Image: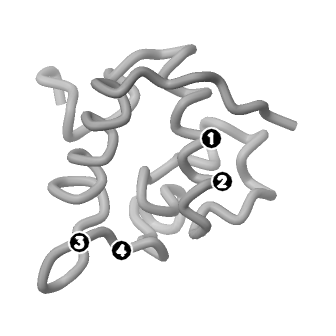
């Protein structure tokens, strides 16, 4: 089980912008909460890779709060490099 860590406003804003603009944009604007990418391996608005983060595979990543908790946990472990659209090396 993961726990929610406090997320500074700037980090929350960066993750929200990534979700809306490059990870899971919804047609017509906003965020696609049920987004699935990478052949089913990336799920939810923050496109959490369940093959890499196996602890997240059983989570309902289409739930914004749960997906955000997972994203924070990933950010704390890997930084922004975990998201391909935020990583200049991808």
Q: Which residue is mark 1?
A: 69
Secondary element at image label 4: loop
The residues tagged by marks 2 and 4 sit, at their Cα atoms, a distance apart of 14 Å
Residue at screen point 20% across, 40% down: 85
Assign a secondary structure to mark 1: helix
Residue nearer the viewer, 26 or 54: 26
Where is residue 47 drawn, in percent x and y?
A: 44, 53
Mark 1 and mark 3: Cα distance apart in space: 19 Å
- SS for dot 3: loop
Q: Which residue is mark 4?
A: 32
Residue 66, label in figure: 2
Quick one: label 2 or label 4, which is nearer the N terminus? 4
- Disc 3 or 2, which lies upstream in sequence? 3
Label disc, if present, on residue 30 of the rendered structure: 3
**66 left or right, relative to 27:** right
Ranked by sequence position, the earlier of labels 4 and 1 is: 4
Separation (CA) of disc 3 from disc 2: 18 Å
* Residue 41 x/y as whole percent: 54, 57
Give the camera-side residue of 67 and 8.
Answer: 8
């Amino acid at each position: 089980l993961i726990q929610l860590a406090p997320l500074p406003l700037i980090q929350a804003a960066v993750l929200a912008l990534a979700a809306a603009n490059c990870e899971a944009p919804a047609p017509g604007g906003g965020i696609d909460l049920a987004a699935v990418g990478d052949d089913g391996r990336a799920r939810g608005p923050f496109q959490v890779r369940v093959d890499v983060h196996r602890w997240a595979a059983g989570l309902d990543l289409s739930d914004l709060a749960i997906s955000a908790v997972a994203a924070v946990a990933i950010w704390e472990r890997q930084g922004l490099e975990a998201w391909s659209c935020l990583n200049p090396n991808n």
